[in-house]
Image (tube, rainbow, N blue to C red):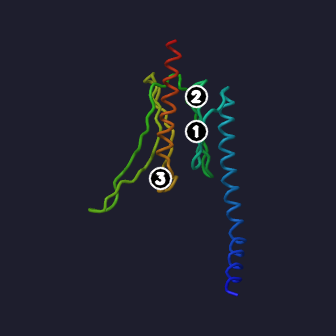
């Protein structure tokens, strides 16, 4: 009788929890589909294709190494924006992390405020372009690997810039 009650409890729990898991996964997949579609439209509008891409939180980034372009899309319930960066004039790319110290006397700790990828242009009259990977005011205090994603994309952009300089020299 005890075993029967346990099995019945497990079955009822699964029946109760499974719709929530299903709807959560459906919502996540829809969000990811919308981000990828946004990247494709952005690339198409610029006569380009997306090669490598990455999705996180409410953001997506992609690169077309042939056309030397980076595409970025951010879509949340409150905001949406997109950015296209041509790497033809970009000479550098770096990850910038801003932090502040919080806490009391002996219990001080550093809090990451933002993680961004900054693109530096050869023409100094053009302002640096910034892609935000993490903002603690929007994304919450818990990071989900955004620093690793930003560092990986820094290297991808540097590789693309390097190959662009080789093509120019040829």
Q: Residue 157, image x and y in percent?
A: 51, 31
Q: Any mark on residue 69, and which?
A: 2
Q: Secondary structure at mark 1?
A: strand
Q: Any mark on residue 61, and which?
A: 1
- The residue drawn where x is 67% and y is 40% is 38
Q: Residues within 10 Å of mark 3 (few under 14, many from 20)?
A: some
From the image, state whether disc 3 or disc 2 is nearer to you: 2
Query: Are circles 3 and 2 on residues that touch, CB within 8 Å?
Result: no
Residue farthest bottom in this picture:
1
- The residue drawn where x is 48% and y is 23% is 162
| Residue closer to the observer: 139 or 152 | 152
Residue farthest top in this picture:
170
Instruction: Tell which circle, 1 or 2, labels the residue nearer the N-terminal end.
Output: 1
Question: Residue 82's image quarter?
Answer: top right
Q: Is residue 68 left or right of residue 103?
A: right
Instruction: Tell which circle, 3 or 1, labels the residue nearer the N-terminal end.
Output: 1
Q: Residue 81, image x and y in percent?
A: 60, 41
Q: Is residue 162 left or right of residue 105?
A: right
Q: Residue 80, image x and y in percent?
A: 61, 44
Q: Secondary structure at mark 3?
A: helix
Query: Are circles 3 and 1 on residues that touch, CB within 8 Å?
Result: no
**Structural distance between the alpha carbons of marks 1 and 2:** 11 Å
- The residue drawn where x is 60% and y is 40% is 73
Above or below residue 161? Residue 151 is: below
Instruction: Tell which circle, 3 or 2, labels the residue nearer the N-terminal end.
Output: 2
Quickly name the residue at label 3. 136
């Amino acid at each position: 009788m005890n075993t029967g009650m346990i099995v019945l409890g497990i079955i009822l729990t699964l029946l109760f929890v499974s719709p929530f898991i299903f709807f959560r996964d459906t919502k996540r997949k829809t969000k990811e589909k919308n981000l990828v579609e946004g990247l494709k439209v952005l690339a198409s509008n610029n006569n380009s294709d997306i090669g490598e891409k990455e999705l996180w939180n409410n953001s997506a980034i992609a690169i077309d190494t042939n056309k030397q372009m980076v595409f970025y899309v951010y879509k949340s319930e409150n905001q949406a924006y997109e950015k296209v960066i041509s790497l033809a004039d970009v000479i550098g790319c770096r990850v910038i992390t801003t932090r502040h110290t919080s806490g009391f006397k002996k219990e001080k700790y550093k809090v990451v405020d933002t993680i961004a990828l900054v693109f530096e242009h050869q023409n100094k009259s053009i302002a640096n372009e910034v892609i935000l990977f993490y903002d603690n005011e929007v994304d919450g205090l818990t990071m989900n690997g955004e620093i690793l994603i930003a560092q990986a994309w820094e290297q991808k952009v540097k590789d693309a810039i390097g190959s662009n300089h080789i093509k120019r020299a040829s």
